[in-house]
Amino acid sequence: MTRPLNLPPEHPVRVRIAPSPTGNLHVGTARTALFNYMFAKRHNGQFILRIEDTDLSRSKPEYKDNIFKSLQEIGLNWDEGPDIGGDYGPYKQSERLPVYKTWAEKLIAADFAYYSYETQAELDAAREKAQAEKRPNIYNGACRDPEIRKTLSQQPDETGQPRKPSLRFKIPKAAGTLTFKDLVRGDVSFDTALLGDFVIMKSDGTPSYNFAVVVDDITMAISHIIRGEDHISNTPRQILLYNAFETPLPQFAHVGMILASDRSKLSKRHGAVAVSDYIAQGYLPESFCNFMALMGWSPPDGEEVAALSHFIAQFSLERITHSPAVFEMDKLNFLNGKRIRTMAVPELLLLVQPYLTQFDLTHYPNERLLQILEAVREPLTRLNEFPDAVSYFFGRAIAIEATLIDEVLTGETPHQVLTAFQLEFMPTAAFDNQALLTDQLKAFTKQLKPIKVKTIMWAIRAALTGRVHGAELSTILFILGKETVAHRLNAALALCLPTEKTTS
């Protein structure tokens, strides 16, 4: 079977993302949404959001809200759909049941659909028999026969109640091989004899996934369907429905899956899989979009660190690979860390403040807060790392772990360093001039030769910050001020008296 001509070239580009509110927005769905968004914006088209919520037992309002918020947080604002309105919105399948019923009646009238009265128990038994005989579980089409249909309709179900029929699509007997062109994978073929007449309206009056999708995409004038490869098996059924409605096909593009680093399906056992979890950890929306854009697509100019607008200008479906993409945390951390290091510090302060609620930020003027962030941000990759990174700048005293005391502060040499720092450096230190403090520290380390510079710096850092890595020491001294430095130095000296020499 050859497919009918696709939508004409002049048809406006209209794409959609259609998540089910049965969980928070998954990274894989977000990546698909991003590809749809970039394609729409590249062609001055429209990006549409549709909520597929006909599974009432699993659909939850909180998941729907998470989908909305997550898409908005990463900058993928939809042109039509829930909370937008317009000629076609809002789009919630649960509110479109009369539409599906009307379109189902069209298929009945055209002899493309019939009622099927088998009970679920009878269908389950047929499936088990097929499995035992190691053959495909294909519906046998019994209810195509009006007499069988009539007989079953008059029989009660296993509970003695009247049978509730489902509505099945009648696959044309001459269908044969169905081939469609996938914009990512090329020609894809299916043997329609292996499909069987499939359900389009369930016995409870709700539409099946494949039927609702086709009705929605037709009525919403979707031009391109860009989705995950797990939907390839749905495509032949959907094409048959398009043909039955005598409606031109949209273009199909099925992108590869996202795998974990161990090449297995990305799941919760690998860590966070919801977009909201990554945003909560302090991954910046721009960085996250940058990262997702490169999972399965590559820009022709080879630039991998860029704004979304830069990628949109170069986006094409031809550069999407059909191979699975790997979720590489190291790459995400690199992209996020680079953006943290290069953004304007006032902007960074606004983003970081929600993570610093345990600190009294009024302790410092805004200028000092900016200086603190500038001093600590170099090695950080997420916003939620800032509380630990800045903690030693707040409070008069600090806690020093026992292992650090044992390894860095205990002994004659560390005690000698801290004593010299207290008696020789502190009285003349220029705490109001960071540049001069830097020079004074260099001179101080030279005075303590042959003690290694690393030993000197680690002892002072441990005493003042409770750690051996962090901001430049002169910056720490300048921001903390003389009084706090002196207090912490006295406390450290009390903790780390030199060990007594052992005698043989």
Image (cartoon, grey):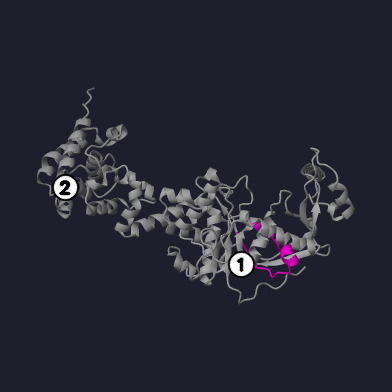
> Cα distance, mark 1 to mark 2?
69 Å
Q: Is residue 108 left or right of residue 491?
A: right
Instruction: Single out the residue that lies furthest toward the left.
Output: 428
User: Nearer the N terminus, badge 1 or badge 2?
Assistant: 1
Callout in the foreground (1, 2) = 1
Q: Disc 2 marks which residue?
A: 446
**Magenta residue span:** 231-255
* Callout 2: SS: helix
Q: Answer whether residue 457 is magenta in the image.
A: no
Q: Disc 1 marks which residue?
A: 224
* Callout 1: SS: strand
Residue 130, position in %: x, y? Answer: 81, 46
Closer to the camera, 392 or 104? Answer: 104
Picture residue at 40% right of the left edge, 50% below the top:
282
Q: Which mark is residue 203?
A: none
Instruction: Single out the residue that lies furthest toward the top.
Output: 504
- Answer yes or no: is residue 232 visible: no
Picture residue at 60% right of the left edge, 77% below the top:
10
Number of marks drawn? 2
Residue density around tag 2, few if under 14, some if 14–19, many if 20 or more, within 10 Å: few
Closer to the camera, 267 or 219? Answer: 219
Q: Is residue 269 left or right of residue 185?
A: left
Q: Is residue 502 above or below residue 5?
A: above
Residue 397, position in %: x, y? Answer: 23, 37
Residue 390, position in %: x, y? Answer: 29, 46
Residue flagged by tag 2: what amino acid is it?
Lys
